[in-house]
């Protein structure tokens, strides 16, 4: 999954170190109160990060740990758009060249912003091309470091820094975290960060490979013809061993949200929280609003991203009237 | 202006006390970095308050200072919607009856939310009826306390609590605050809170009575036929002596933003900050983006509200594509 044959395991110590690095870089993202069905809980507004998503965390932890030699050779990432922006943001700040492999059908706003951050964008066809193979080939050609979007120990640890911020903001460890889940990088990171919390991944319906993997005890992939989903950030076909090793020990189950529930969550965030969420960033909130998840005053719902094309968002919000 | 003939002046001590009360009630609203034209500055996201606007501050400071006898007789407020929700929110929390006089053409979302918070809403016609007279008559009839939207010392002090939060979040007093301005309650409060900062009120074009008052040295009102504006929260015809007494000492000038500039600011907040702003909450940002205001790393732009009808917002955002 990365350019080295063997991977170290992500650790809680790594999460602590990532959190220290993040604290030196950016203020904690806001933890805001929310009331759902008469229950007070919390949302962690990662959509308010500079690149509009939590992905800035893992990218920063990984890129800032590269050696001078590795930095000089650059990085390669494969991403539908938020990891892309996170890596591009960190690379620009560190003066590192970044080549990013993105699907041609990624939201235009994500393609444009990744380019604006100075990265070189390489497009591929999501339906016919193997994005991992393209990324690996590109990294090999350039002798660059491949920064995987989720199957990387630094990336997992970096994403987990959000969990330590939450604990500091609450003044205690959360009882439960609902996390939008694609490949399981954030979910695994939060599990390492908050060992006492119940960690619940939430995926789009039909893309719930992590939930099925947890139920089966072994990694399952989505079917060969998964349904269309607006959650472009969560369209991963399978989690990876480095993630599942953490998830299987810490997550009892996973949830899924329908497309309609995701849109309803985007509308709720708009009207009640005054926050802009992309579909994939609203999945955990969707499960909570749909009554699929237990909530209490120690529950934190991750709002993971807010990079959405204006017209797609306008159409969703229009329906609220 | 209020139900008593004579008013005390708002004080910095009052702002400090209001800030203490707010800190016991709610976390500080987020202060987020923003980059405009290559300059890094800050936005104070008051749109993330529980009622979606800073008005919760002044309402809480005023209502929580009422005597038991005053509380038992209830409160009356006159508002286009955000002060209404602030008063309704505080009244519900304190178990006080609230009657709120609102224009019949207020955004539906503001009318609905004020009712949802338990207040009794009394409608009036913005073009033909004198809302202040209706409010005074209602307060007299009920022997209730009239909580003016801006010409009240508690309200001014309460709004000013945002300024003390900013100073604490920055670790120093801001160099400059750009504030969306209707009657001047927030602007006066910020001036008291941050005596070293340059305080710049921003009004909608054609509703810039405060800017003209500052230029003239005496209170001026908007003309008899002001232009239509989407900034419903900033449609006040004139500031009042209690506000102007502070403003004329501390504000060198005021700025105005066009309707198009306000829409552009809403789009910027949507795409770059992932925040939902109502038109009146985007006026200060609009002036900054239009290059009308000086900016530096100590400049704070107030984002004062995010209560906007979904279809109106969808139409603004759609244009960004």
Image (spheres, coloured by chain):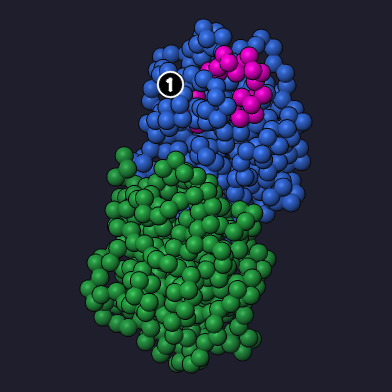
Chain colours: A green, B blue
Q: Where is residue A313 in the image (x, y as percent from the top left)?
A: 35, 53
- Of all chains, the one bearing label 1 is B
Which quarter of the figure is the N terminus of chain A placed in? bottom left
The tally of labels here is: 1
Q: Can residue B87 be seen in this view?
A: no
How crowded pointer 1 is (Cα within 10 Å; few <14, some 14-19, many 20+) is rated as many
- Vertical position of residue A308 compared to residue B133: above or below: below
Asked whether A253 or A111 is in front, the reply is A253
Q: Magenta stretch containing residue B92, yes or no?
A: no
Q: Which residue lies furthest to the top in this view?
A: B141
Q: Which of A20 and B292 is in front in this view?
A: A20
Asked if residue B68 is among those painted magenta in the image, a careful observer would answer yes
Horizontal relation, residue B141 to residue B215: left or right: left
Q: Nearer the viewer, residue B26 or B10?
A: B26
- Residue at 29% in and 53% down: A260
Instruction: Mark yes or no: residue A221 visible.
Output: yes
Q: Which residue is drawn at 37% across and 87% down?
A: A133
Q: Residue at x 61, y 12 (%)?
A: B3
Residue B167: percent from left, percent from top:
71, 46
Element marked by disc 1: strand
In the image, residue A162 above or below residue B279: below
| Residue underneath mark 1 | B121
User: Which residues fall within the magenta stretch?
Assistant: B59-82
State whether residue B111 is above or below residue A154.
above
Residue closer to the observer: A177 or B177: A177
Query: Which image quarter holds the C terminus of chain A?
Result: top left
């Amino acid at each position: 999954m990365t350019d080295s044959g063997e991977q170290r395991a992500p650790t809680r110590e790594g999460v602590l170190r990532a959190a220290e690095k993040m604290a030196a870089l950016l203020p904690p993202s806001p933890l805001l109160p929310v009331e759902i069905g008469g229950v007070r809980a919390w949302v962690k507004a990662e959509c308010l990060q500079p690149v509009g998503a939590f992905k800035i965390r893992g990218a920063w932890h990984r890129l800032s740990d590269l050696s001078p030699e590795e930095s000089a050779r650059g990085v390669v990432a494969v991403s539908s758009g938020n990891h892309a922006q996170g890596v591009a943001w960190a690379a620009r700040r560190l003066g590192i060249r970044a080549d990013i492999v993105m699907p041609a059908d990624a939201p235009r706003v994500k393609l444009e912003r990744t380019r604006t951050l100075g990265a070189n964008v390489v497009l591929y066809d999501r339906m016919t091309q193997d994005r991992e193979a393209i990324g690996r080939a590109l990294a090999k050609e350039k002798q660059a470091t491949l920064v995987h979007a989720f199957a990387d120990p630094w990336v997992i640890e970096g994403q987990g820094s959000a969990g330590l911020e939450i604990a500091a903001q609450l003044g205690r460890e959360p009882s439960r975290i609902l996390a939008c889940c694609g490949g399981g990088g954030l979910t695994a990171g939060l599990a390492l960060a908050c060992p006492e919390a119940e960690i619940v991944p939430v995926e789009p319906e039909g893309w719930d490979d992590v939930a099925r993997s947890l139920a089966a005890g072994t990694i399952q992939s989505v079917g060969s013809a998964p349904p269309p989903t607006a959650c472009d950030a969560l369209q991963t076909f399978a989690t990876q061993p480095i993630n599942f090793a953490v998830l299987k020990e810490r997550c009892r189950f996973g949830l899924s949200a329908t497309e309609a529930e995701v849109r309803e969550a985007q509308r709720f965030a708009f009207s009640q929280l005054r926050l802009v969420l992309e579909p994939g960033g609203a999945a955990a909130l969707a499960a909570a609003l749909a009554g699929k998840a237990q909530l209490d005053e120690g529950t934190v719902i991750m709002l993971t991203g807010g990079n959405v094309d204006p017209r797609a968002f306008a159409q969703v919000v229009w329906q609220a009237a």
